Amino acid sequence: MDSLCQEVAFYPTMTVPNFFTPNGDMVNDCLDILSENAEQLHQRIYNRWGQLVYESFLTDESWDGTFEGAPVAAGVYFLEIEASNAYSQQREIIIRHAVHVMR
């Protein structure tokens, strides 16, 4: 009997919503990034003037729509995600995405 083994690489994948409603009604109150096979996830969110309003290095952390403890204004924000795992040698999976904050 002969056998053949081959390593299969699973690169990180992400599902990113395009809006959320941080209004305290317990529905869609946080921006949740759903990631699979990501060991490291670097999220950055900028306002329309390019100011960094949120940053996280954790795969299971969500943005609650606040900046410095206060709710951000409704509008468009820009999300940038870098992800990696054991198969990707560096943070190479980059997503740039617009996110609407609706109140």
Image (cartoon, rainbow, N blue to C red):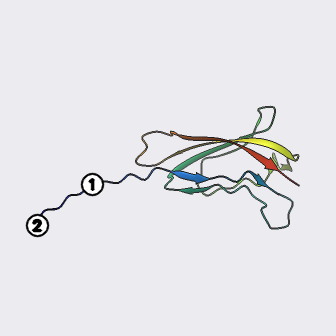
Would residue 59 appear left or right of 9 to someone viewing this image?
Answer: right
Q: Which residue is mark 1?
A: 6
Q: Quadrant of residue 62?
A: bottom right
Quadrant of the image containing the C terminus:
bottom right
Across and down, in percent, residue 70 comes to: 86, 49
Point out the residue furthest to the front here: 1
Q: Is residue 28 left or right of residue 33?
A: right
Tell me which amino acid carries mark 2. Answer: Met
Give the percent coordinates (x, y) of residue 43: 64, 45
Q: Distance from label 1 to label 2 (Cα)?
A: 17 Å
Neighbour tally class for label 1: few under 14, some 14-19, many 20 plus, Cα within 10 Å: few
**Residue at the spot of label 2:** 1
Q: Residue 82, located in which quarter of the rendered image?
A: top right
Residue at 13 percent across and 62 percent down: it is: 2
Callout 1 amino acid: Gln
Comparing labels 1 and 2, the label whose residue is closer to the camera: 2
Residue that appears at 60% across and 47% down:
57
Q: Residue at x 50, y 52 (%)?
A: 39
The N terminus sits in image quarter: bottom left
Q: Most extreme residue toward the left, as rendered?
A: 1
Per the image, label 1 sits on a secondary structure element best described as: loop
Q: Secondary structure at mark 2?
A: loop
